[in-house]
Image (cartoon, rainbow, N blue to C red):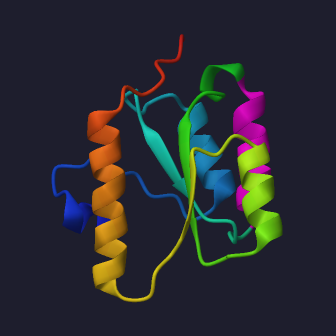
Amino acid sequence: RALSKVDPDAFVIRAVDGVEALEIIDADNIPKPYFIMLDVNMPRMNGHEFLQKLRANKRDSESMVFMFTTSDSARDIAKAYSERVNGYIVKPQGKAGMHSILDTIRGYWNTCEPPMNAA
């Protein structure tokens, strides 16, 4: 929701948990390239479990993933980077901080050339 406020033209698909996110990605209806914003703490499948499953799927293994979470645990951070997360961001308190970070991610996305996965 906050990303839509920072960039009203952004095409955003929201999943309530990792299981639903994988179902959406597996349906292959999302235009590529895309990036994933992921929380460590999700119901049914946590962020680390999601990353392991995503990275195991050759078609989506190079997807750009940002972990965006309240967890500042050194263990979570190290584990996320070992699972090839592109960035680990601890959610700031307040809307201004959130919008600033989302604006930075949007700028990064618009500046960098994302991986183009073969179908």
Query: Where in the figure is residue 51, as x and y percent of width and height?
Result: 72, 46
Q: Residue furthest top?
A: 118
76 horizontally vs 91: left or right: right
Instruction: Please determine whether, in this image, residue 16 is positioned above or below residue 37.
Output: below
- Residue at image position (16%, 57%) is 8
- Asked where in the image residue 53 lies, by quadrant, the reply is top right
Choose top left, top right, bottom left or bottom right for residue 104: bottom left
57 or 73, nearer to the observer: 73
Q: Name which residue lies at 66% across and 28% down.
A: 61
Identify the residue at horizontal 79%, vertical 42% (top origin): 52
The residues colored magenta run: 44-57
Q: Is residue 67 left or right of residue 109?
A: right
Q: Is residue 1 visible?
A: no
Placement of the C terminus among the 4 image quadrants: top right
Q: Residue 69 at x, y = what percent?
A: 59, 71
As displayed, is residue 114 above or below residue 96?
above
Q: Quadrant of the N terminus?
A: bottom left
Does the magenta-highlighted stretch encompass residue 92?
no
Helix, strand or loop: magenta stretch: helix
